[in-house]
Structures are given as C-alpha cells and as structure tokens.
Amino acid sequence: MFVSTRWRGYWALIVLGIALLALPFLVSREYTHLAITLVILVVGTVALRLLFLSGRLTIGQNFFLMTGAYGAGFVILRLQLDPWIGLVAAAAISVLIALMLGLILLRVPGVYFSIATVALVLISTSAMRSFPALTGGDQGLTGIPGLAVGSLQFSTDPRILYNYYTMLAIGAISLAVMYRIERSPLGLLIRSLGGNDELAQHLGVSMLRYRMLVFCVGAAFCGLAGAFSSTYLHQAAPETFGLNSGLYLQIYAVVGGLTSFWGPIVGVLFIEGLVHSLRAARYVQPIIYGLILLLFFLWLRGGLLSLPSAARDVFRRVTGRGKQE
C-alpha cells in the first residue's frame, strides 16, 4: 500500500508537470500571465507556512518579495548589471536582510512577532515612498530591463513563454527545497517543537537557530520571486507590496490549510481563481477576502484540505442521529 501510494504521488507530479509545461500553448496570454502571478504568490505563501511551522506567524512575508524586487532594480538600474545577476543578487540581499532582522524579530514571542512584521511592512513601504530620488517614490523603480539570453529578449515574446518557464522553474525549485526541509528530520523537529519554546529550551534545543534557517530560506525564495516580478513587469512599486498583499498571503494559507504543505497552494488557486472569474470582484477584493476568511474561521478552520474529513464528520453525526431517532 505504501509503495503504491508513493508511486501514485510520483505519477500525479509527472502529469501536473506535463500540464504546466503545456499550459501556455493551451490558453491565452492573459491566463499565462495569471499563471505567472499565481506561482509568485504560491512561493510567498508556502514560505509563510514554513515559518509558521516553527512557531512564528508572519503577516509581512511580502516584505521579502519587495526586497527582491527593489534589490534587483537597484542592481540592474544603478549598477548596470545583467538582469540574471540582479536575480541572484536580490536573493542574496534578501537573505542578508533576513539574517539581520531575524536576530531581533525572531526573539519576539507569539502575536507580538506578527505585529512586528506588520510594522516592518508599513515602515518599509513608507521608506520606499519617502526617498523618490533613490527609490522612485510612489511610482517606484521603472524601466527595469527584462531577462534575456544572448539576443533573445524575453519581454519581446508576445506569448510570454520564456518568462513563464523561468518563473515556473523558480517556483519548482523553491517548492522542492521547502518540501524537503519540511520532510527532513530537521522539519520534523521544527514541527514538533515549533509551538512550544519552553519544551525546546528544556530539551536544550535552540529554536532561534532553526527559525533563522527557515526565515532565511523563505526570504531567499521570496526575494528571487520578487526579483523576477520586477524584470517581468519592468517595475518595482511600493503599492504592490503594501500591507494588503501580506494579509492576502496569510489568507491563502489559512483558507487552503496550514496543516499540509499543499494547503497554501490550494488556497492561492481557489481564492485567485474565484476572484479572477468574478472580474468585477477586483473592485471589492478586500471585502471578498475578508468574508472568505471569516467563513473558514467559523466553519472550516482546517482549510479546504480538511473539507473531506469535515464532510465525513457531518455525515456520521447526521446518520448517527438518524439511528437514535
């Protein structure tokens, strides 16, 4: 049974991979662009969940998407370096910032950590607006060159195939690394002790060290995804990385289910698919997100992935009541 289940998982990944590779040839440019956006959101949401497993729930994971976008913009525009170098440099910059911030913020317990990450987003977006000569102000950094291989400019491709496959590769590598971390002995330790600092201290385990690790890993991949977005959209603007975007990442994770690695992915696909299908809903997006979150908190706290088990429980209660009657 174990072997067959494992192989079913492998086959499912193979089929999913083939479908994702074929996607740009089956849909319009609009949906290819949507797929790129979804992959960026998935990377940020899965990184948020990885930190959550260590006992810290952040509302500011989008901060590292911003450091990646602006970091790449500075390296490419100010230093006149190749955009590919900008991507790598942005990831490194995000990790460096995570190291400095983590030494302070990760010592803050519980809900106070979440509040601190809110403050981090508010301060950083205000800073990006306050120094227009350096950051471009409200407009942000514009005119960021796109990726290229030799004379092949990704931005000139009308079907955005090259940008799609680049982001798909970044997403696949990011998810594979974070999945392996979660499934490793280190991940088991983090899951077991992440929410109990007193037990970890009693056992002589330094949770700060492990939190720093997952904090930096998430920062690296978010920075890389943010850097790609700046080369793809040719800009990095503070409006894109405001507090709302950080809250949305948290909502994706909660709606999909924080107990499973696949929960954040399901949450992103469900909510963004719903909002995209209701085009007029874009104007009331925060209201829709808030209502969805409220409904899940009230009736489906385990997220969408817990829906089958919740349905079974309801069925058993109903049938049990019927037997008693």
Image (cartoon, rainbow, N blue to C red):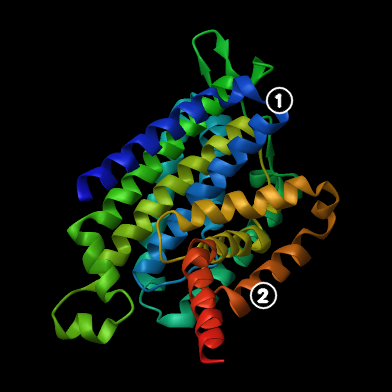
Residue displayed at 46% across by 68% down: 309
Q: Residue furthest top?
A: 151
Judged left or right of residue 248, residue 254 is: left
Question: Dividing the picture into quarters, in which one does residue 9 lie?
Answer: top left
Across and down, in percent, residue 308 comes to: 50, 64
Are the residues flagged by discs 1 and 2 in contact, CB closer than 8 Å? Answer: no
How many numbered marks have been drawn onto this rendered protein structure? 2
Across and down, in percent, residue 111 comes to: 49, 81
Residue that mark 1 sits on: 28
Q: Choose between 141 and 225: the one closer to the eye.
A: 225
The CA span between labels 1 and 2 is 34 Å
Q: Quadrant of the C terminus?
A: bottom right
Residue displayed at 37% across by 65% down: 102
Above or below, comparing residue 230 to residue 82 in the picture: below
Judged left or right of residue 112, residue 269 is: right
Q: Choose between 301 and 105: the one closer to the eye.
A: 301
Q: Amino acid at mark 2?
A: Leu
| Disc 2: CA contacts within 10 A as few (<14), some (14-19) or many (>=20) | some
Residue displayed at 47% across by 58% down: 263
Above or below, comparing residue 12 to residue 22 in the picture: below
Residue that mark 2 sits on: 294
Across and down, in percent, residue 162 comes to: 55, 21
